[in-house]
């Protein structure tokens, strides 16, 4: 086959990193169509006896087509990494471990500021964003991040009752369910987790 295929292992921030990795790859190689597939079967690594994780995560997979004719296009993006936090989210001997409090603190410290910086660098304000699709790590995380946007907390989508935390699939699931087919013109994305890593972006349609 002449189709290029490669993996990006970044868990909950993987979708935002992935769409820009594919965008750059396609532009550099002169390719017209790309497909980003997310799939994190955490049921294979979550300890069923660990109530901190077994009740939180769900398995899911998505596919996102990327090309010049796509309805939604990629705008500006920002990324960040803090390797000192790697022990808070890791797999040891085939079992997943998460320090929930540290991950919550990390998300609250990094994500709101990162989104505000991205908006400022894009000459935008929260008023210019129709919706915020951030990683659905937990309802508490989404609510806490939303409260840092005092004027527009209602713009933060929250939809995980039936799916739980689906890792890299949580953002594209939000996009499929709430963004595609909507009248919205500009949406902000933010993924954060393993690494520790985080990535935020603006997507838009004319």
Image: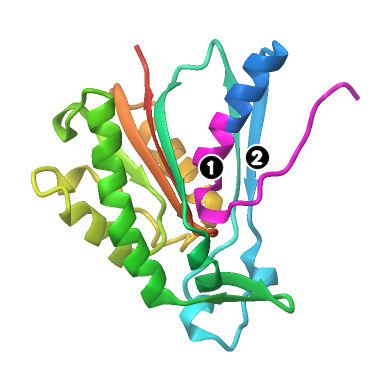
Q: Are marks 2 and 1 in contact (CB under 8 Å)?
A: no
Residue 94 in which image quadrant: bottom right
Magenta part of the protein: which range?
1-20
As helix, strand or loop, the secondary structure at mark 2 comes to strand
Mark earlier in primary sequence (2, 1) = 1
Instruction: From the viewer's perspective, tell me whether residue 8 is left or right of residue 144.
Output: right
Q: Nearer the viewer, mark 2 or mark 1?
A: 1
Q: According to the image, label 2 marks what residue?
A: 37
Residue 6 on the magenta span? yes
Q: Kindly identify the residue that appears in the image at 39 percent across and 62 percent down.
A: 161
Residue 15 on the magenta span? yes
Residue 204 in which image quadrant: top left
Task: List x then y, in percent, for residue 179.
Answer: 37, 33
Residue ranking furthest to the right: 1
Q: Height in image: 87 above or below 128?
A: below
Q: Kindly identify the residue that appears in the image at 54 percent across and 58 percent down.
A: 195
Q: Give the CA separation, mark 2 to mark 1.
A: 9 Å
Task: List x then y, in percent, for residue 202.
Answer: 36, 29
As helix, strand or loop, the secondary structure at mark 1 comes to helix
Asked whether 205 or 163 is in front, the reply is 205
Residue ranking furthest to the bottom: 49
Residue ranking furthest to the left: 151
Q: According to the image, label 1 marks what residue?
A: 15
- Tell me the quarter of the image containing the N terminus: top right
């Amino acid at each position: 086959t002449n189709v290029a295929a490669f993996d990006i292992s970044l868990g909950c921030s993987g979708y935002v990193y992935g769409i820009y990795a594919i965008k750059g790859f396609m532009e550099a190689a002169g390719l017209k169509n790309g497909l980003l597939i997310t799939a994190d079967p955490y049921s294979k690594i979550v300890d069923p006896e660990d109530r901190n994780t077994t009740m939180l995560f769900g398995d899911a997979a998505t596919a996102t087509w990327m090309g010049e004719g796509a309805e939604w296009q990629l705008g500006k993006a920002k990324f960040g990494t803090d390797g000192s936090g790697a022990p808070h989210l890791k797999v040891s001997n085939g079992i997943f471990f998460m320090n929930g409090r540290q991950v919550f603190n990390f998300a609250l410290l990094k994500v709101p500021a990162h989104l505000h910086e991205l908006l400022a660098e894009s000459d935008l304000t929260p008023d210019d964003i129709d919706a915020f699709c951030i990683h659905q790590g937990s309802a508490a995380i989404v609510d806490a991040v939303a409260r840092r946007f005092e004027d527009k907390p209602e713009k933060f989508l929250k939809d995980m009752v039936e799916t739980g935390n689906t890792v890299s699939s949580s953002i594209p699931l939000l996009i499929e369910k709430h963004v595609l087919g909507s009248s919205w013109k500009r949406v902000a994305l933010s993924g954060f987790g393993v690494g520790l890593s985080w990535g935020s972006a603006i997507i838009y349609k004319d």
